[in-house]
Amino acid sequence: MNDKSMEKEASTLIQQIGQAIDGLTNDWPAAQQAIVYQQTTYTPAQFVTKLKAALAPLQAVPDARSGLKTAIANRLTALPDVIALLAGFNAILPQYLPAGADVTTFGGKAKKVRKPQTAEEKTASNVQRAATRAARHIMGKNQRKAIKAPAPPARPGTDTSGAERGPPR
């Protein structure tokens, strides 16, 4: 018997046991006080208890699946808060530890050590940096100081010799 057929049979049995318990509880004739099953006499209440005991292992799987779905949903709901809590803790952790302390013992990630550049990588970086500065017209402090603005143009009506002229006639 494969898993799917066992699941279907278990589901059917759960339904049938539920109906039997319901029938014994609600519809059993009051005059009939004894049930004989496998040469043992039971009252209707005792037989309901026996049926519930038989139902328990069959009902455990659907209950566990339902609990798993609930637990997964609760975990997904709590995940952003837990991430924020842990990120906040890791952010404040260096304030409380001595300089250079190992944060990995508290669950944090160690800062990645920068790998030194090779000579070829340095050359390529310098070429790219120069190209970026040229393309964006970026200048250093001394380069900006070296730029001299042209003299402002003379206003009309003023003589460049310094003598004032009278009003036009």
Image (cartoon, helix red, strand yellow):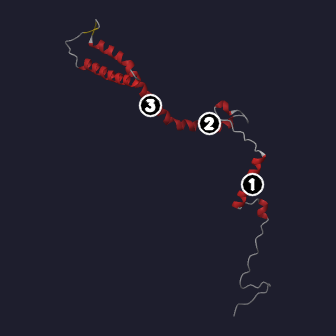
Camera-side mark, 1 or 3: 1
Residue topped by disc 2:
89
Residue at (38, 18) in percent of width and height: 56
Indicate the quadrant containing the N terminus: top left, top right, bottom left or bottom right: top left
* Picture disc at residue 127: 1
Relative to residue 2, is residue 92 depicted above or below? below
Q: Earlier in the sequence, mark 2 or mark 3?
A: 3
> Which residue sits furthest front?
1
Where residue 42 sits: x, y (%)? Answer: 28, 9
The residue lying at 73 percent from left, 78 percent from top is 153
In the image, 39 versus 33, the foreground residue is 39
At x 47%, y 30%, the residue is 71
**Quadrant assignment, res 53:** top left
Residue on which the image places disc 3: 70
Other residues around mark 1 within 10 Å, as few (<14) / some (14–19) / many (≥20):
few
Q: Amino acid at mark 3?
A: Thr
Q: Amino acid at mark 1?
A: Val
Q: Secondary structure at mark 3?
A: helix
Percent coordinates x, y for residue 99 in the rendering: 73, 36
Q: Of discs 2 and 3, which sits in the foreground?
A: 3
Dot 1 or dot 3, earlier in sequence: 3
Reply above or below: 37 against 72: above
Left or right of 96 on screen, residue 160 = right
Q: CA distance from mark 1 to mark 3?
A: 58 Å
Type of residue at label 2?
Answer: Phe
Q: Which is nearer the eye, 166 or 26?
A: 26
